[in-house]
Image (cartoon, grey):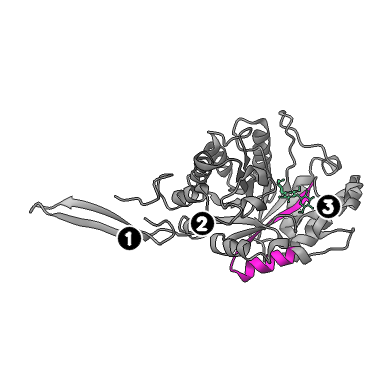
Amino acid sequence: MNRTTRRWRVTMGATVAGLGLLAATALSAQAAGSTLHEAAADQGRYFGTALAQGKLNDTQYTTIADREFGMITAENEMKMDATEPQQGVFDYSAGDRIVDWATGHGKQVRGHALAWHSQQPGWMQSMEGSALRQAMLNHVTQVATHYRGKVYAWDVVNEAFSDNGDGSRRDSNLQRTGNDWIEAAFEAARAADPDAKLCYNDYNTDSWTNPKTQAVYAMVKDFRSRGVPIDCVGFQAHFNSGNPVPNNYHETLQRFADLGVDVQITELDIEGSGGSQAEQFSGVTQACLAVERCTGITVWGVRDTDSWRASGTPLLFDGNGQKKAAYHAVLDVLNGGEPGDGGSATS
Ligand code: G2I
């Protein structure tokens, strides 16, 4: 069956009546989605991508983005260095271009990212102490206020935990302003945009047994118990052979969801090719669908050539904009089929 045409799945339940005839007691026809966005929406989820404003004149790029995705993240344009290049001087031009494209095409927006140790403007990199704390909070307030009402969810704080295996916070100028900098950022974001979902976002938090995962979990649990305004946790999900999709991924997502927050896969890419890459994309998609509060998946770019690690061909479309095996695998899972069976589920 042609995967790109709309398919009909028929589910029949039958009982044997006295006359020995089969009587259909249930007959339902359900449309299968023909795009990632449509298929995810049928599951009550979004499917998104990251866009770079410099590529918005590339019609192959925008055609795919418009057709396949319902949630847009600015790959770099809403980060601290882009939005506050000089202290107190805000530049929303690039971010607005992304947001305007998204809303003009009926998409939602994930905001990325309000406070981060990386991609700080030069003036902020050299700050410390209470002056830095105040500057960070002002940044959060100003940017969240500018985009108020236009952003579905914000990555309020990004990558604040270290990878050293002891579950500690990452050392950074922001961390050195005091351990409560993260909750202060969340409070400021909530005050500026009460309707956006506020997320903590990180990488290497995929395996439930990783000390970094446990540390983020403990923070979120603590925030929930003390009423710090956190609504969601983002799992970046940058995978490759050295960092494969863990087999306890579903458990990780479920444990966080059980704290009363949404979970979102926010920057998915998986280096590789062919069937093995497709299988891993299927697994991630299945894990999200298996968790009621996993509200959506975003892949970190459109075509392989758009990726921050293009040589790893980690995305769903090749450099010519063609759908890869991984694309079909994800679509099949979203449509309720077993990975690789073409998605044409029958009774
Ligand atoms: O590194 C992958 C991602 C990890 N999680 C946070 C994300 O924000 C991060 O995205 C990447 C972007 O995909 C890259 O495009 O963040 C990088 C920077 O941390 C981005 O790279 C930067 C280059 O380093 C700059 O030289 C360049 O000017 O992209 C900039 C804009 O093209």
Q: Position of residue 88 (x, y in %)?
A: 88, 61
In the picture, the quarter occupied by the N terminus is bottom left
Mark 3: which amino acid?
A: Met
Task: Judge from the rendering whether residue 7 lies leftward or rightward of residue 41; answer left or right.
Answer: left
Circle nearer the viewer, 1 or 3? 1
Can the viewer see residue 61 in this picture?
A: yes
Question: In the rendered structure, which disc, 1 or 2, sits on the residue that comes first in sequence?
Answer: 1
Q: Which residues are magenta?
A: 95-116
Secondary structure state at the residue bearing disc 1? strand
Counting labels gives: 3
Q: How many other residues sit within 10 Å of disc 3, few (<14), some (14-19) or many (≥20)?
A: many
Which is more toward the observer, 39 or 320? Answer: 320
Q: Which numbered tag is attached to residue 29? A: 1
Image coords of residue 264 (percent x, y): 59, 49
The residue lying at 61 percent from left, 45 percent from top is 314
Q: Amino acid at mark 1?
A: Ala
Write down the residue under mark 2.
Answer: 36
- Location of residue 101 (image quadrant): bottom right
Disc marking residue 77: none
Q: According to the image, label 3 marks what residue?
A: 136
Circle 2: residue type: Leu
Q: CA distance from mark 1 to mark 2?
A: 20 Å
Could you tell me which residue is drawn at 49 percent across and 59 percent down? Answer: 35
Can you give x and y, in whole percent of width and height, for residue 83 in the image? 80, 60
Q: Quadrant of residue 144?
A: bottom right
Q: Is residue 131 magenta?
A: no
Q: Earlier in the sequence, mark 1 or mark 3?
A: 1
Q: Position of residue 296 (x, y in %)?
A: 56, 52
